[in-house]
Amino acid sequence: MRVLAFDPGAKRMGYAILENGPVYIDSGIETCIRFPNEPYQEYRARLIDQWVGRAFTMCKQYHPDLVAYETLPVRGFRDMSQALLAATAITTVHAVAIYQHLQVSTYAANSVKARIAGSNKATKVGVRKGVQLFLPELDVPGWPQYPDESDAVAIGLTALGYKL
């Protein structure tokens, strides 16, 4: 099984492609910059446009069997507009996956932390270390540039059924 996993965000979203084994294929960060004085709705529309195109391209390039992503928490955001934008980005990806008849799974952050880092209270560092236990080839200086990338890999590992 091949999984395309996402860690949603309003300004950047981590992604990862994994297969059973586990086999690491690719991961990274996609960014969307909000320009100074850009109205919220214009940024939101640009975000949707970006993710429609990017999600179709990723599905065509990687041929996933499953698209997985972390659910957004209902609270904890300092800025609710960021939460709404992150929800917009991941909902767009979800819609593209459904349009392409792909299976979609969602995972709570606490579940991902517990499965990959061994504790539902794990930090970003703990999640990264758990990912590197499953995929030692990622245990290199400077990886990841942002935690969103290692979180996306952790979500992919969770979707594939791995547990520390």
Image (cartoon, helix red, strand yellow):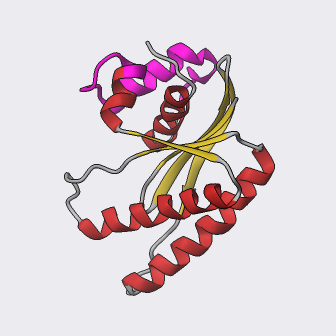
Placement of 118 over or under 78, stated as above or below? above
- Residue 117 falls inside the magenta stretch: yes
If the image is split into quadrants, where does the N terminus sit? top right
Q: Position of residue 98 (x, y in %)?
A: 62, 57
Q: Is residue 162 left or right of residue 70?
A: right
The image quadrant of residue 41 is bottom left
Residue 12: give x, y in percent of width and height: 48, 57
Up the image or down, 30 lies above or below 116; here it is below
- Give the magenta part as a residue range: 115-141
Please say whether residue 102 is one of the residues in the magenta stretch.
no
Residue at image x 49%, y 70%?
A: 33
Q: Is residue 12 visible?
A: yes
Q: Is residue 125 visible?
A: no
Query: Looking at the picture, how far across and down is residue 73, in whole percent?
Result: 28, 49
Q: Residue at the spot x=35%, y=32% of the render?
A: 124
Please provide percent x and percent y for residue 40. Answer: 38, 82
Q: Quadrant of the C terminus?
A: top left
Relative horizontal placement of residue 143, taking residue 59 as reference (left or right): left
User: At x 48% / y 61%, what residue is drawn?
Assistant: 91
The prevailing secondary structure element of the residues shown in magenta is helix
Taking depth in this image into account, of 86 and 67 the one nearest to the observer is 67
- Nearer the observer, 97 or 8: 97
